[in-house]
Image (cartoon, rainbow, N blue to C red):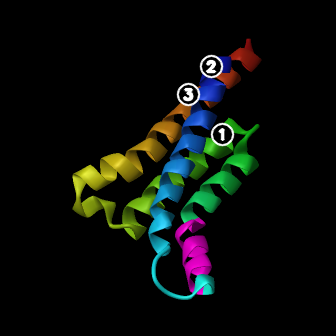
Amino acid sequence: MKILFWVSRVLIMIYAGFLSLFSLDAFGPGFWWEQIIGFLIHNLPAFLIVALLVVVWKKPSWGAFAFYFLTVVFTYFFHLYENWLLFLVIGLPLLIVAILFTVENFLQRKKNSV
C-alpha cells in the first residue's frame, strides 16, 4: 500500500510539472510584466493541482473525489472531449490518479476494518 501512496502523489507532481511546461509560451516579445502575468495565468492549473495535492495528501477519499471532479472540470473547460489525443494527454493522467486514490482508500478501509 505504501507504493500506491507514493505512485499517485509522484504521478500528480510530474503531471503538474508537465502542465507548467505549457506556460513557457508566455515569454516572447513584449513588456516583462506582461510576460510574468501571462506566465502566472498559464500556470494556474498547475498551481491548482499542487494546492489540491497538499490538501488531500493524507485523505485518499478526498483525493479520489477531488481528482475525479478535476478530471470532469478539465475535460469541459479545456474541451478535451473534442479531441481524444488531447484527452489522453491532459485528462487521462488525472483519471488515473483518481483511480489510484480510490484504490488506496479502499485498501485503507479494508485494512482498518480487519
Q: CA distance from mark 3 to mark 1?
A: 9 Å
Disc on the earlier residue, 2 or 1: 2
Type of amino acid under label 3: Val
Residue where numbered disc 2 is placed: 3
Which quadrant would residue 40 be assigned to in this image? bottom right
Look at 32% across and 52% down and name the residue there. 87
Q: CA distance from mark 3 to mark 2?
A: 12 Å
Look at 55% across and 36% down and name the residue there. 11
User: In the rendered view, does 73 fall on the left or right side of 5?
Assistant: left
Type of amino acid under label 1: Ser
Type of amino acid under label 2: Ile
Name the front one of labels 3 and 2: 2
Residue 103: which numbered mark, if any? 3
- Which stretch did the figure color magenta? 34-44
Is the residue marked by circle 2 packed among few (<14), some (14-19), or many (20+) residues within 10 Å?
A: few
- Along the line of sight, which residue is nearer the eye, 1 or 90? 90
User: In the rendered view, does 94 fall on the left or right side of 104?
Assistant: left
Is the residue marked by circle 3 packed among few (<14), some (14-19), or many (20+) residues within 10 Å?
A: some
Residue where numbered disc 1 is placed: 61
Q: Are marks 3 and 1 in contact (CB under 8 Å)?
A: no
Secondary structure under badge 3? helix
Residue 106 place in picture, x, y as percent: 61, 26
Is the residue marked by circle 1 packed among few (<14), some (14-19), or many (20+) residues within 10 Å?
A: some
Q: Does 111 appear above or below 33?
A: above
Label the magenta part by its dominant secondary structure: helix
Quarter that holds the N terminus: top right
Farthest residue to the bottom: give it. Answer: 31
Q: Does 54 appear above or below 27?
A: above
Farthest residue to the front: give it. Answer: 29
